[in-house]
Image (cartoon, helix red, strand yellow):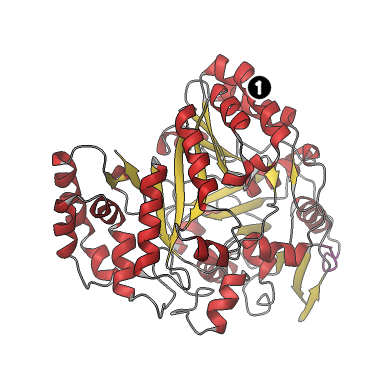
Amino acid sequence: MNKEELSIVFVYPNIYTQFSQHEGLQTLSAVLKKTGYKNIHLVHINPKYGVPADNAKIIEEAKKYKPKIFAFTSTTYEYKFCNKLAEEMKKQFPDALFIMGGIRTTIKNDDLNESNFDAFCIGEGEETFLEFVEKVRNNKNWENIDGLVVKRYGKLYKNKIRPFIIDLDSIPMQDWDIIDVNKLLDARKGWLSLLFSRGCPYSCTFCINNALRKVKGFKNYCRTASVNTAITELKYLADKFKGKIKVFNLDDDLLTSYKNWILEFSERYKKEIFDVYGIEWKIESRVDSLDEEMIKKMKESGCREIQFGVETGNQALRDTLNKNVKTEQIENVFKLCSEAGIKTMAFMIIGVPGETKETVKDTLDLLIRIKANLIRPSFLLPIYGTQIYEEVIRKNMMKVNVVDDIVYGEPVVKLPTLDEKLLSNYVVLFPWHMNARLGLSDYKEALEKFNNLSYADLKKMFSEILKMDENLDKKTKPTHYRYFLKNLYYVERI
């Protein structure tokens, strides 16, 4: 079979998060196209902008391409959906091979035998998937490919993981033709996400990087592409989608841990992109990986927003998460960003083991002091393989099986120190709790109307909550907090 004849369909279950592209699939597609494969397609599953999450409609879409290989990606949240979908698809495509990659397969590949997939890809997939495709095309055995766990001929083959790709510049630019970028930009108001690094050097107990390091090893875990590679891709996109891109969203774990990279990038971005196209950029960071020089250069180059994992306002709780940042560091960096004119966002976890009414007050007070422009409060969701997952399992604190059940956005950890209804109240009505802490009596009274309700009840009443929030917002003078774009999960400072 020649390369043009071999049809490959990537399956992206974009169903529990906002409409987005998938950097991993785009990169795999680019690697294949660079070596001559052209018959590559994407089934982008999304309830609003893509193929609906309906097995019959997904199968109908896939039939257009007559694929030999289905390549899925999945996190823990989508795995159950994908596994059931693969079962149904195999009935319609009995001669096709089904392979899955992503974080889920890397940290939990022992369930391949009970799955509907022929193979799981573990670790980085660029070299592994290309070798798999080549051997399938040439009708050669592929059971012993490094980077694959394989179920074949009634046997399970557990092959070793491949070494990291050290030179990220050797990987081709993402395939921006396999997705509908114009639709993506319209849906996300001109924001486009990219990655230019891999790995994170820190060991927070709630983060999946710890689990990935256990599988992959720490050596060479953290890498970046060169600044030149980054700027080249950004300029390509700025030209290709001229006038449509408003913000480049650098979605890396922690690019700011590379100070010289950030300084060089800021200088070039200003000259070659911001001054030419007017496109701003956003980045994620830790407060201990930034200083005044970096913040100043970033602002000058068009950086509009930095997002930080603050997690909690209580120092003792933050220490249990192995976050290793002090409250004073948080206050200082948010102050520097404010003075520079860079917007800030704080990610907060409500409900870590040990959380109490008093620690929640510490969180509210810290957020008031640092004046974050946006806040993302969320329940603790222990990810399989992380240290905190092991802790809550050991202490019998988990309400549901987060490996197999869809629990995205819900409280799943039982806290002996905080009633679940109050925990749900804190998260769902977070902006009102902020305002009550500011001493705004109208919000204190509004909170009393929703006392002693479950998360499910609060969510059912969210339309009513939003309407009340809108009315309260109209008659409240700054400074106060409200739901951002009428979204349950985001809070903005006015």
Which secondary structure type mostly characterizes the magenta part of the structure?
loop
Q: Tell me if residue 145 is in the magenta stretch.
A: yes
Q: How many marks?
A: 1
The residue identified by callout 1 is: 267
The residue most toward the front is 328
| Closest to the observer, 4 or 442 | 442
Q: Quadrant of residue 194?
A: top right
Q: Is residue 401 above or below residue 407?
A: below
| Residue found at x 14% / y 45% | 471
Q: Quadrant of the C terminus?
A: top left
| Residue found at x 55% / y 81% | 393
Magenta span: 141-146
Give the residue type that dot 1 points to.
Glu
Q: Is residue 465 above or below residue 236?
A: below
| Closest to the observer, 38 or 225 | 225
Give the SS element for disc 1.
helix
| Residue 47 seen in this snapshot | no
